[in-house]
């Protein structure tokens, strides 16, 4: 199976951050066109898949075809009432684990810590608020919290800040690094057969949506 997307951007649909997310998607695509692989697109569900669009089919297919996932995390990302983001995240985490297992088998000497395929952009007003282990442990974590110049305070302008450009390059490089390794993986060819969005009984899904967190932001 060939990759179609350099990254899958997973985010909570909130008016305050949507302009930032759209700008991020545009910038990642331009980075790939200029420095990487111009055929790779960016998956961004701008309108949230509508009823009848087969959410349980289209999202897993997009996850399978994405090199990495970029999570734009706000405190309302894992939400019991609107669990779309949680389902996307858990599905990709399990898919990442299968990819990593095969990568490690094929190249045991590689730096395994650099092969994680989720980049999380954290946007909180309280930098001391703990993050879920599944989000923070062994992840490529960028914390843009607790700073009046960062994304949560003024998302529309954040792409112009000096903090933004290095992370854009990090995302581009992560996509290219994994893209070079992953086409060799058997797990990609089988992905559509086993990657499904988790149901309500999935342990990690339950753990994430049951965390007590103040409403956004």
Image: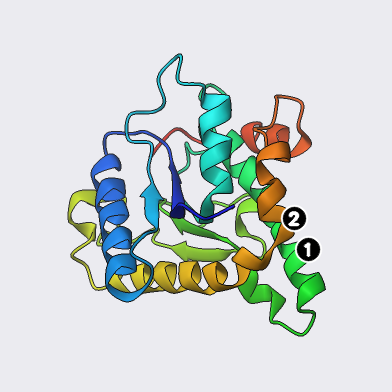
- For the C terminus, the quadrant is top left
Q: Is residue 18 rendered to the left or right of residue 190?
A: left
Question: Disc 1 designates what residue?
Answer: 101
- Estimate how packed mark 2 is, as few (under 14), some (14 to 19) or many (20 or more) residues with alpha carbons within 10 Å: some
Residue under the point 77% across and 85% down: 109
Residues under labels 2 and 1: Cα distance?
5 Å
Location of residue 36 by image quarter: bottom left
- Estimate how packed mark 1 is, as few (under 14), some (14 to 19) or many (20 or more) residues with alpha carbons within 10 Å: few
Question: Disc 2 designates what residue?
Answer: 98
Residue under the point 67% across and 34% down: 196
Q: Is the C-beta separation of discs 2 and 1 under 8 Å?
A: yes
Q: Secondary structure at mark 1?
A: helix
Q: Secondary structure at mark 2?
A: helix
Where is residue 43? Give x, y as percent.
40, 46
Where is residue 200? Give x, y as percent.
70, 24
Q: Identify the disc placed on residue 124.
A: none
Residue under the point 66% across and 31% down: 210
């Amino acid at each position: 199976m060939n990759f179609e997307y350099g990254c899958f951007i997973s985010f909570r649909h909130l008016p305050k951050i949507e302009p930032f997310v759209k700008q991020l998607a545009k910038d990642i695509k331009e980075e790939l066109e200029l420095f990487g692989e111009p055929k790779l697109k960016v998956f961004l569900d701008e309108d949230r898949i509508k009823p009848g669009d087969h959410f349980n089919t289209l999202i897993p297919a997009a996850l399978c075809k994405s090199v990495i996932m970029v999570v734009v995390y706000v405190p309302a990302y894992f939400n019991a009432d609107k669990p779309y983001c949680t389902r996307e995240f858990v599905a990709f985490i399990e898919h990442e684990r299968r990819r990593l297992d095969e990568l490690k088998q094929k190249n045991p000497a590689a730096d395994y810590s650099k092969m994680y395929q989720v980049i999380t952009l954290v946007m909180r007003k309280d930098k001391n608020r703990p993050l879920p282990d599944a989000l923070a442990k062994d992840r490529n974590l960028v914390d843009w919290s607790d700073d009046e110049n960062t994304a949560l305070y003024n998302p529309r302008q954040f792409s112009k800040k000096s903090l933004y450009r290095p992370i854009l390059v990090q995302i581009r490089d992560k996509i290219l690094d994994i893209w070079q390794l992953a086409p060799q993986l058997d797990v990609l060819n089988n992905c559509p057969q086993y990657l499904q969005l988790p149901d309500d009984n999935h342990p990690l899904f339950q753990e994430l949506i049951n965390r007590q967190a103040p409403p956004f932001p």
